[in-house]
Image (spheres, coloured by chain):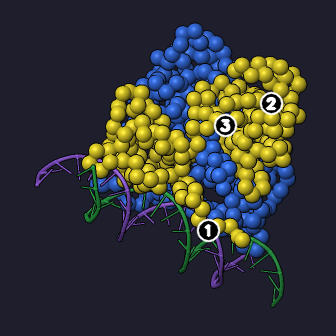
Chain colours: A blue, B yellow, C green, D purple
Amino acid sequence: MTAKATSESARDIPEATVARLPVYLRALVTLSESGTATCSSEELAAAAGVNSAKLRKDLSYLGSYGTRGVGYDVDYLRYQIAREIGQTQDWPVVIVGIGNLGHALANYSGFRSRGFRVVALLDADPDRHHEVVAGVDVRPFDDLEKIVAAQGVAIGVIATPANAAQDVADRMVAAGVRSILNFAPVVLNVPEGVDVRKVDLSIELQILAYHEQRKANA
Amino acid sequence: MTAKATSESARDIPEATVARLPVYLRALVTLSESGTATCSSEELAAAAGVNSAKLRKDLSYLGSYGTRGVGYDVDYLRYQIAREIGQTQDWPVVIVGIGNLGHALANYSGFRSRGFRVVALLDADPDRHHEVVAGVDVRPFDDLEKIVAAQGVAIGVIATPANAAQDVADRMVAAGVRSILNFAPVVLNVPEGVDVRKVDLSIELQILAYHEQRKANA
DNA sequence: TAGATTGTTAATCGATTAACAATC
DNA sequence: TAGATTGTTAATCGATTAACAATC
């Protein structure tokens, strides 16, 4: 039997939409905290920085959670999106590479509040071991496999220098990590089925500089 | 006279291409440092993590910098891309918000090597003033206008908490900053002509978690 | 019922890709 | 000349947007 064409859970949500769902969720949390019970697609779109047609189209992939003539119930929609993107679950995460950036990530409060739990900080440098960052011990990189297995870690964060990143990724994948957030400025090679997302701070600045240069030359 | 339809410098490069040029440039730098003089589109594409058709299409927006039957001269192409995205220039940058993330950004070596020069670190908290981070004094946020004017700052980085970010952006724009890299988890409102790019660490993790959840349910 | 707003359709736009003529 | 590889075309794919029928 080959792969089923469409399984029950396989409502396919476009990548562009997936990337916006966390933005909508954050806007809904803000609205909820400010006491707003109901909002229109126009209002939510404004809070999320998109146009309302795009918002409604995106939400339509999840289902019909609004009421025509009325709008969306803020808390209900918030829950539906949170469930869809897995934010109702607990996600154990390891961070490898505890330099400046690793420190900042370990201390970042936005992770915990979204269901991400930093279960370990690893670094290859023995001088950093047993340092405590954000209440978590820094441990040897060689503990990786043990920790991934013991804690059921599915997501790894790489904040090492570029030259270490591929090795770290290989070890993570071998240990069973299937999703990697990579801050090192290299292209990682991983087997099919492993997801990598990359954040490159200087690339973002370079894109701004390109447009800036064009403005100056206009 | 209304705006000229096509000015000499207005060869329009698609956004998706602009976002990849820094990736190609980084791959070329690596090739150059490893002593490679020439490369094919196939080789460069592999190093950059894209397919070769996309690479050639992207490069075609810049001009014809390759040789049929031969490939690309690594250093020549490197220079052409660097020039196109403004990396041959010096870009003075201010960072506002010197918490954990601000520290990491101030210390990030990838900025300097790409022409970005951190000319000031600003924070509203007086306790942080005169602290020295990465060789630069932390100064009061109120010095912003003075510094932007004196140093010709065109790019600002916001690494403050969410609730301060819009105010910081408003002040930056008023002071003449036209490009903003925003790490605060809010949607910034800025006037037309001002560019904002956003990096949201927890959103990237949430996108991974969404796919992870799907793998688990497959 | 009249007004408001969703969810969906269809048109448009932009990005990707394969294929190949041009040309070194 | 024969082989290699670019630069470009055209087809395909996916994302955005405007418009509006459905419906509260």
Kindly indicate the quadrant of the structure image that contains residue B32. top left
Kindly indicate the quadrant of the structure image that contains residue B202. top right
Q: Secondary structure at mark 1?
A: loop
Q: Which residue is mark 3?
A: B91
Of A172 and A162, nearer the camera is: A162
Task: Name the residue type under label 1.
Answer: Ala
Chain that bears disc 1: B
| Labels 1, 3: front one | 1
Residue B87: image x %, image y %? Answer: 57, 39
Q: Which residue is mark 2?
A: B122
- Residue occupying the point 48% across, 22% down: A144
Q: Pointer 1 and pointer 3: residues touching (CB < 8 Å)?
A: no
Q: Is residue A75 left or right of residue B15?
A: right
Give the CA distance from mark 1 to mark 3: 29 Å
Q: Which residue is mark 1?
A: B5
- Residue occupying the point 42% across, 36% down: B75
